[in-house]
Image (tube, helix red, strand yellow):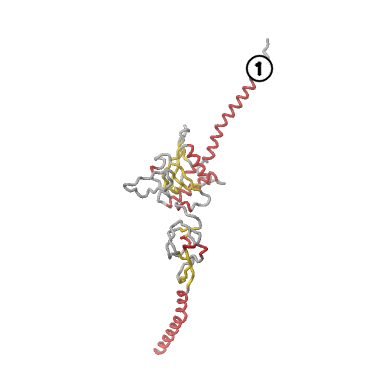
Amino acid sequence: MKMNNRFIYGIFSILLAAVIAFIAIPAVTSKTSSTVQIVRMTNAVPRGTQITNADIELAEVGGFNLPDTLARNLEDVAGTYAAADLFPGDYILPEKVSSVPLSSDLTLNSIPDGMVAISITTQTLATALSDKLQSGDIIRLYHYDDENVLEPVADIPELRFVKVLSVSDEKGLDVDYTTPPEEDEERQQTATITVLATPEQAMLLTRYENEGILHVALISRGNEKLAGELLERQSEILLTLYGDGTDPETEELTSSLDASSDEIQDTSTPAASDDTETKQDDAETAQDASVSPRD
């Protein structure tokens, strides 16, 4: 009985060795020894620079464990722009190149469809939150109009939660307030704030900047979850004001654009009334003049 078990184990071992020798090893060897052609960098290309045919080459390398997304044709890479600093010998992955020129500000390369980037001027140190704004901040904008005696300060529903894309100085250079300046370095001052906005918000920002002073209030910083919730609330407000339907339980809001139109109409109505009264007075005067007084 013991001999039979040993014989069976021996046969099984021989069969297993044969499978490994004649099937497994050749399969692994074929994979590791197979080669493919991929695009490889020959020159160093800084980020944002266009890649030319002189900067790349086709190289034959082992195909084992290579990503499927590697560029394999020169035509797919030549003419694109380096999305990161590339060095000789680098393989080209999709995230390393861009089909469009890159801006120095990465936030301007990924503006959502239907949105715009618009800059507003900061008139004073106070309006710019004392030069403490940063990219990614969620802010609220207030409008001050000294010509409006009754309500000089207005809370704008369309501009309650707005995302800051960048902060620039008077030369248009990005300002980074995350690190303090060196001892001999002059601190940059905020001149403009670039924000992400809808077309309606952009119209209001353009008008309010030219009709008074815009003040910035910081709402959220460094809290991605809260920022998303605030921007969603702003989207709901805009939908209520400019969308097709409204929620009955939503706070009653008046479009700032509509309010401005009403003000223009109100100011023009008295003038029309005065003109009508003037015409009536002239008609009565003419009628009196045509009647001769009795002796």
- The answer to whether residue 224 is seen in the rendering is yes
Looking at the image, is 79 positioned above or below residue 259? Answer: below
The location of residue 138, given as percent across then percent down, is 43, 47
Closest to the observer, 126 or 72: 72
Closest to the observer, 191 or 37: 37
Closest to the observer, 138 or 49: 49
Q: Residue at x 49, y 69 (%)?
A: 37
Q: Residue at x 43, y 85 (%)?
A: 14
Closest to the observer, 13 or 82: 82
Q: Name the element at disc 1.
A: helix
Looking at the image, is 206 positioned above or below residue 1? Answer: above
Residue type for callout 1:
Ala
Count of numbered labels shown in the rendering:
1
> Going by the picture, which residue comes out furthest to the left?
183
Answer with left or right where residue 290 lies relative to residue 40.
right
Give the class, few, some or many, for how many residues have Cα within 10 Å of label 1's Cα (few <14, many ≥20).
Answer: few
The location of residue 35, given as percent across then percent down, is 47, 72
Q: Which residue is mark 1?
A: 289
The location of residue 174, given as percent across then percent down, is 42, 48
- The answer to whether residue 254 is seen in the rendering is no
> Going by the picture, which residue comes out furthest to the top?
295
- Which image quadrant: the C terminus? top right
The location of residue 134, given as percent across then percent down, is 40, 48
- Which image quadrant: the N terminus? bottom left
Looking at the image, is 109 positioned above or below residue 32? Answer: above
